[in-house]
Image (cartoon, rainbow, N blue to C red):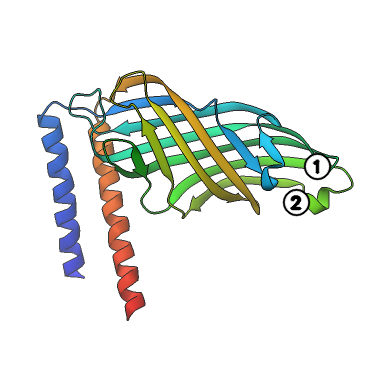
Amino acid sequence: MMRGYSGWKVALGIAAFLGAVSRSAGASPVRIDFDLAGSEIRALGGMLTVPPDGTLSTASLFGVFPSSDSVVPDAGIAVLGVEIGGTVDATVFNSAITGTFDLALGPLAGPYDGMDSFTTAGSSNARVDIDLDCVGALCSAIADFPIFESGFRDIVTPLSFDFENLATPGGGNVAALFVIELSGISVVLDLQGAEISRSVVPEPGTSLLVAAGCVLLALSRRRSLVTARQAL
């Protein structure tokens, strides 16, 4: 027990030291916001795709990255957040599916390679709000309607995001493609976005990234313990 406590002290000490170095160098993290209006949400094997089978009323992504000049992201621990939501108005097998959905992912913490890749470490937190209904003779064959889900859940699958041109302010792009299970339905999130703003994150922005680093250390340590126990 004492050994684990000592390890935590070392981990927190390293994180605090890195944060102090970043602050003393006058560097502040940079926040980049993206418009995800070019995204698609697909379900039911592609028979339901929003848009055009509905609209996206909310579609945005932000990323907070370490930066030595408060303009261009550097490699290190980054934090992302995604929100996408809208309406559904689709016809599948002559049955009308209508309703609303909203999905918020984050904060997503993980390593950014300084060039084009970010992948979450450990499980991700998601807030889900779905309210869908169906009218038609074949609704029961499509899914278990009505579908209603509201609350928080963990997504255990790592989520990967690809970035382009982050070294050029105003020219950044982001793309991601992953599948999540919502109310028993496999939903494909095909995210495509373009940068709309870039700004310096004042303190406690550095502390946010340091805290994210501590969380990743904890997740890494927990995975190591689980692996060790499974080997026994």
Tell me residue 188's x, y (percent): 58, 44
Depth order, front residue of 123/48: 48
Which residue type carries mark 2?
A: Ala
Mark 2 and mark 1 residues within 8 Å of each other at the beta carbon: yes
Quadrant of the image occupied by residue 118: top left
**On the rendered image, what quadrant is the N terminus found in?**
bottom left
Kind of element beneath mark 1: strand
Question: Label 2 belongs to which residue?
Answer: 143
Tell me residue 128's x, y (percent): 57, 43
Tell me residue 6's x, y (percent): 15, 62
- Please state if 188 lies on the left or on the right of 205 as rendered: right
- Please state if 207 lies on the left or on the right of 174 as rendered: left
Q: CA distance from mark 2 to mark 1?
A: 9 Å
Tell me the tag on residue 134.
1
Residue plotted at (51% across, 45% down): 178
Residue plotted at (50% across, 45% down): 126
